Amino acid sequence: MSRIDGRKFNELRPITITTDFVSFAEGSALIECGDTKVLCCASVEDRVPRHVPYGAGWVTAEYSMLPRANRERSQRDVSKLKLSPRSAEIQRLIGRSLRAAVDLEALGERTITIDCDVLQGDGGTRTASITGGYIALALACKKLVEGNILPRDPVKGYVAAVSAGIVDDELLLDLCYEEDSRAMVDFNCVMNGQGELIEVQGTGEGRSYTLKEQQDLALLCSKGIRELIAKQKEILGGSHR
C-alpha cells in the first residue's frame, strides 16, 4: 500500500516541537506532527481539588479544537454551553497519561493544568497533545525547581503517545486524517520511557481484530514512541529517566 505522503508503514510524520511558544505560561510547547498542530500550555496553581490526598498535588488537562482546526468550521464548546463528549474523553486521557509521569507527593499541594488547543487537526490530535503536553509539564516543573519552590523535580519519567491503525488490512503507524477516516481499526497507545504501557485505546470500526493484530499494533506504536521520547530527551536535555 502506498501512503498518501509517501511514508513507510512504520514511519512517523515529521515532528517539530517549539518550546516556550507562549510567554506567560509556566511551560509551553507547540507540537507539529505533519499537518497536526497543537499548542500545549502548563499552568501552576497553589491549590488542589478536594479529592486529592493531603500533601499531594494534581495534574489535569483540558482539550479543545479551535473552530477552523478542521476542514470545516466547528462550533466552540462554549457556544453549546457544555464540553463535547469527545473533548471530555480526550482531556481525561491526557490527564491520566501525564499524571503517570509525576510524583504527586513531590509536587506538593499544587495543581498543574495542561491546556491542549488544537490549532490544526490532521489526525492524532490526542496523542500529539500527550507528547507535547509532557514537554510543557516538564518545563513547568523545571521552573518550579529553578525558582526554589520545589526541592527536586517531581517528573519521574517520560511519557509519549502515538496512533496506529489498520487501513485496507495493512498496519500503519501515525495515521493522518485521510488514513484515519478509512481505518478499519483505530489504535492509540501511551507508553513511558521504559517501554511500559500506560493506556491503550483500540476500536474495531470497520471490522474486528485479532489478539495478534493488537500485539502487532502495540509493537508498531512502541517503535514510534521510542522515537518521540528520543525527541523529548533532545529538547529537555535527557534529565528524566
Image (cartoon, helix red, strand yellow):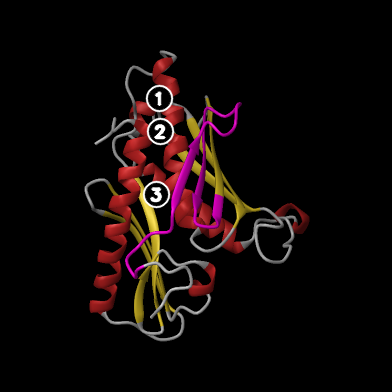
Quarter of the rendering containing residue 214: bottom left
Q: Is residue 50 visible?
A: no
* Foreground: disc 3 or disc 2: 2
Q: Would you say 187 lies left or right of 24 here?
A: left
Hey, what amino acid is under mark 3? Ser
Residue position marked by numbered label 1 in the rendering: 142
Disc assigned to residue 97? 3
Identify the element where label 2 is drawn: helix
Q: Nearer the viewer, residue 81 or 124?
A: 124
Residue at left offset 43%, top offset 69%: 6
Q: Which residue is outermost to the top?
A: 148
Q: Nearer the viewer, residue 105 or 218?
A: 218
Residue at left offset 52%, top offset 59%: 89
State the separation of the CA atoms marked 1 and 3.
19 Å
Residue position marked by numbered label 2 in the rendering: 138
Residue at left offset 75%, top offset 55%: 81
Q: Earlier in the sequence, mark 3 or mark 2?
A: 3
The vertical placement of 198 against 59, above or below, is below
Q: Residues within 10 Å of mark 2 (few under 14, many from 20)?
A: many
State the separation of the CA atoms marked 3 and 2.
13 Å
Q: Position of residue 238 (x, y in %)?
A: 28, 33
The vertical placement of 34 against 178, above or below, is above
